[in-house]
Image (spheres, helix red, strand yellow):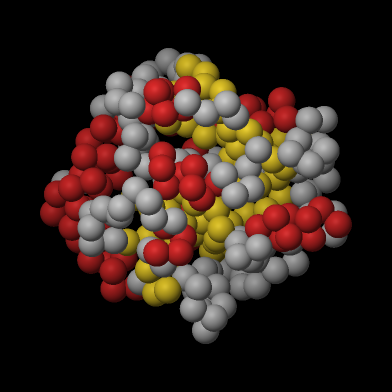
Amino acid sequence: MTEIWLYTMSLNEERMLPFFFRHYDRWVDRYIVYDDGSTDRTLEMFAARRNVEVRRFERSMPGSFVISATLLQNAAWKEARGKAAWAVITAIDEHLHHPDILGYLASCRRSGVSAIPALGFQMLAERFPDSAEWLADTHRLGAPFDEMNKLSILDPNLIEETNFVLGRHSAEPTGRVVYPEADELVNLHYKYLDTEYLRSRHALLLGGLGEVDKAAGLGWHYQLSTDRLDAEWRRFASMALDYRDPTVGFTTHLDRWWRGSRRRS
């Protein structure tokens, strides 16, 4: 088994899909996408690709998008057992990056690594990028962001359960769990691409929250006011750095749940 399968969700991703496929086509063999009712060209763009399977996202927990999504993310990848070497669980605006990703995954496999978390960066851009760009190369400025430290790649044949918390912000995997000795994979979160895109994206996702989500405060960040979003942008900008700068050394990420709080590696 050598194939890599990627699992994700979609909702009106027409603008992001060129970046998504340009990034992941370099190393992913098959995409399984759960769509939440896209009304733009998203489904048309998926249909044009032979290695994409689109399924309808169903709310298994009535009234909650967030809980239903987490239940799906904890289960969908299991079908890759006996068929794929690696399963990727990510979002369309999350770009998992390593300078030699296939070589890195091969090394992890030889070392018995079965669970690969990624160090999160909140990526920033003053203008929405050109659709022909490879974002990991042309947009390298981002703020280290521990909330995006996520279990993103796993061996579906060795991991039994992922046990993601809501939002995949941490996990408690079971099975033959072996993490890399050092953290080399990064999770580049491309949502702060320009203020108009960010605001429209939040408004769209806010509309998908259910009554259970709202009552429990889930998806609260989609409800931030314009002033709060602007303040968040300034906060991230004040911490931004080139994620490829060799002097960074990824020492800025403190809360690595897979190594214990505030442990560095």
Q: In the picture shown, does residue 123 fall above or below 150?
A: below
Q: Is residue 19 left or right of residue 232?
A: right
Give the position of the C terminus as an image quadrant: bottom right
Residue situated in front as seen by the camera: 146 or 101: 101
Question: Which quadrant of the structure image shows residue 133?
Answer: bottom left
For residue 196, say whether it is visible: yes
Kindly identify the residue that appears in the image at 42 percent across and 47 percent down: 19
**Residue 91 coordinates in the image, percent (x, y):** 48, 41
**Residue 137 coordinates in the image, percent (x, y):** 45, 64
Kindly identify the residue that appears in the image at 39 percent across and 74 percent down: 241
Residue situated in front as seen by the camera: 30 or 81: 30
**Residue 239 coordinates in the image, percent (x, y):** 34, 73
**Residue 114 coordinates in the image, percent (x, y):** 77, 49
Q: Is residue 171 left or right of residue 206?
A: right
Question: Which quadrant of the structure image shows residue 209?
Answer: top left
Kindly identify the residue that appears in the image at 23 percent across and 62 percent down: 126
Q: Is residue 116 left or right of residue 167?
A: right
Kindly identify the residue that appears in the image at 55 percent across and 46 percent down: 24
Give the position of the N terminus as an image quadrant: top right
